[in-house]
Image: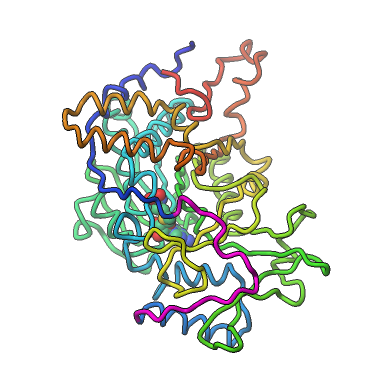
Amino acid sequence: MMRFFPELKRLCAGVSSYISRKSSPVCGRLWAGQWMRSCSRTSQIMKEGSQDNIMLKHLISKIKSTGPISVAEYMREVLTNPVTGYYQHRDVLGPQGDFITSPEISQIFGELLGVWCISEWMAAGKPKTLQLVELGPGRGTLASDALRVFSQLNSMLKDSEISVHLVEVSPKLGEVQAQLLTEGEQHLRHDPNGAIYKTGTTKTGLPISWYKDLQDVPRGFSFYIAHEFFDVLPIHKFQKTKHGWREILIDIEPNSPEKLRFVLAPHATLASKTLIQNDDERDHIEICPEAGIIVQNLASRITEDGGAALIADYGHNGTKTDTFRGFRGHQQHDVLTAPGTADLTADVDFSYLRQMTKGKVTSLGPIPQHEFLKNMGIDVRLQVLLRNTSDPGTCTGLIDAYDMIMNPEKMGNRFKFFALLPCDRLISSNDTRSIKHGPIAPPVAGFSELQL
Ligand SMILES: C[S@@+](CC[C@H](N)C(=O)[O-])C[C@H]1O[C@@H](n2cnc3c(N)ncnc32)[C@H](O)[C@@H]1O
């Protein structure tokens, strides 16, 4: 086997310490079956605390003044409304929250994504400046694990200028991230109304900044990581009818003015006229235009500045229909009940992301998580961690966490990895004639075996 990156061998022996994770055995957003399926079904409104009542009242008054709203507008308001949005003021991840994610379950997950960045940085010829950009970083755990790998490889990276950029709408999660990644909020510079709303230095001495929008992240050679980010972006839903595609909207239940229900738009809406391009064989589709805009932005940045994007999420290749669902307390939750108290999510349509970036960048995947992590050497990493601990409880925890993220019956198959790379990244590796002209490009780790 060819050896492209002998330096990465160090990783197997280097990043070896166990980091305790207090994870739950239940992965709330994981077993997402079909939950709420009828377009005309009315939700039960639970009488709860004031927070969700405020959101419900806000939505009802909005609908009263402008008419039924799209599912996208509903999702945007419920999740990210600056005052009462679900993500704004609470730490929603982990056993005490509503769901748990792979980086929260196993430290190896973020470490291997850190290795992926380094292997692509090497494949790009080790550019001097390198930005790690994470979209929707949750508690900052993935970034922390990836940055530990960067520190371990300090001898290789010491001449590089590395900076960290977090795109996060939630002030609460921004605080949690700062707590983990820096010496704390009091050591950061705050500018609540600025495009860069927080800046400082990581515990490992790297410049770190927070943004609400990817557009504000400085241009430059970057790795963009988005884990369970695209699935929370607002989707439009459409139903095929005998009159053509009709958008599904959210309205007030006529006989119960404190309840919401789904209705079909009587006529074509702007969204149904502009978003549905081809005649689809499915009778129900979900489209996320915000995801399209973000991947187009990523594609332009990768083309002009270099780098790559790694998108990991649950999703499909343009085959699924109704995937919109809610999660609360690790259980599925009716999407129209008590809005603002539960996470809302929909499977990512990777075929749509590919279509939006076609011609600008090369895409790889989606491939199942277990395949990506296996290719990245998760088994070797697990063995190193197990060898370095004598505590039986820690060993069991490591093995259980591995099983949770790798087992195809658990997270291994449901979650997929998808990459955006510069157009020329794969050319020479696929074209043996190019041997005459230059060296063979190394394969992209994760999508094929990591070369040690
Ligand atoms: C499902 S959580 C995933 C967290 C983390 N990536 C993980 O895997 O543990 C979604 C994250 O995206 C953030 N988020 C949601 N909508 C966003 C938006 N429009 N722009 C930026 N961040 C957003 C949330 O606050 C949260 O940090």
Note whether residue 211 is visible. Answer: no
Residue 95 pos. (x, y %): 30, 55
- Quarter for ligand 1? bottom left
Q: Is residue 436 above or below residue 158?
A: above
Answer above or below: position of 365 versus 8: below
* Looking at the image, residue 216 lies above or below residue 106: below
- Is 394 in the magenta? no
Residue sitting at x 56%, y 41%: 304
Percent x, y of residue 434? 64, 15
Residue at the right extreme, as displayed? 242
Residue name at image x 52 percent, y 25 percent: 448
- Prevailing secondary structure class for the magenta stretch in the rendered image: loop
Q: Residue at x 69, y 64 (%)?
A: 238
Which image quadrant for residue 160? top left
Q: How many marks?
A: 0
Residue nearest the viewer, comparing 47 with 164: 47
Q: Nearer the viewer, residue 101 or 129?
A: 101
**Looking at the rendering, which quadrant does residue 12 occupy?**
top left
| Bounds of the magenta segment | 29-49
Q: Is residue 250 left or right of residue 282?
A: left
| 54, 48: nearer the viewer | 48
Instruction: Name, please, the residue furthest toward the left.
Output: 390
Q: Residue at x 81, y 66 (%)?
A: 244
From the viewer's perspective, tell me whether residue 147 is left or right of residue 3.
Answer: left
Question: Where residue 380 sits in the image (x, y, percent)?
Answer: 35, 23
Magenta stretch encompasses residue 45: yes
| Residue 326 falls left or right of residue 282 | left
Q: Quadrant of the C terminus?
A: top left
Left or right? Give the position of 56 relative to 109: right
Residue 414 appearing in the image? yes
Residue 278: percent from left, percent from top: 78, 54
When asked about the image quadrant of residue 20, the answer is top left
